Amino acid sequence: QVQLEESGGGLVQAGGSLRLSCAASGRIRSIYSMGWYRQAPGKPRELVAVSTSGGNTNYADHVKGRFTISRDNAKNTVYLQMNSLKPEDTAVYFCNVDAKTLTRASYSYWGQGTQVTVSS
């Protein structure tokens, strides 16, 4: 199994910044993609940004130019730097990691979520 520990959420004013972190631990053999999703009240969960093991990144259109995803492979950690935050960015942000462990083939793991609230 893989455990994901998220941190960095909170309350910020519009125009402000936050940095989310997600550290993966467990009997990990390989990590493939690492990414962030979010879910606002009454809406489905949506992709925010993803980083592949090959170094490629992909962003949702509404965060391009404002959010930056990065990863530290030595620490099995993914980050999401969020700048120029808007009230519509308010949501619970979930870390997602595709990983292979010593006992399980590639599987998608989810963090517990961290609340981001942007006030106007």
Image (cartoon, grey):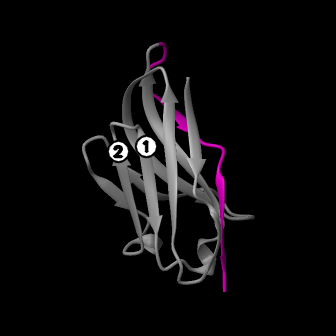
**106 magenta-colored:** yes
Q: Is residue 30 above or below residue 10?
A: above
Please tell me which residue lies in front, 44 or 106.
Answer: 106
In the picture, measured across the screen, residue 79 lies left or right of residue 93, that is left
Residue 97: image tag: none
The residue at the point 50 percent across, 41 percent down is: 23
| Farthest top residue in view | 103
Residue 53's x, y, as percent?
A: 30, 40
The quarter of the rendered structure image containing the C terminus is: bottom right
Q: Quadrant of the N terminus?
A: top right
Q: Residues within 10 Å of mark 1 (few under 14, many from 20)?
A: some
95 left or right of 116? Answer: left
Nearer to me, 101 or 21: 21
Residue 90 x %, y %: 64, 70
From mark 2 to mark 1, how far is it between C-alphas? 5 Å
Percent position of residue 112, x then y: 66, 44
Which element is circle 2 on? strand
Q: Was residue 57 drawn as part of the magenta stretch in this picture?
A: no
In this image, 16 relative to 68: left or right?
right
Amino acid, disc 1: Thr
- Say which residue label 2 marks: 72
Q: Residue furthest left?
A: 54
| Stretch in magenta | 103-120
Residue tagged 1: 77
Give yes or no for contact between labels 2 and 1 (Cβ–Cβ under 8 Å): yes
Mark 2 vs 1, N-terminal side: 2
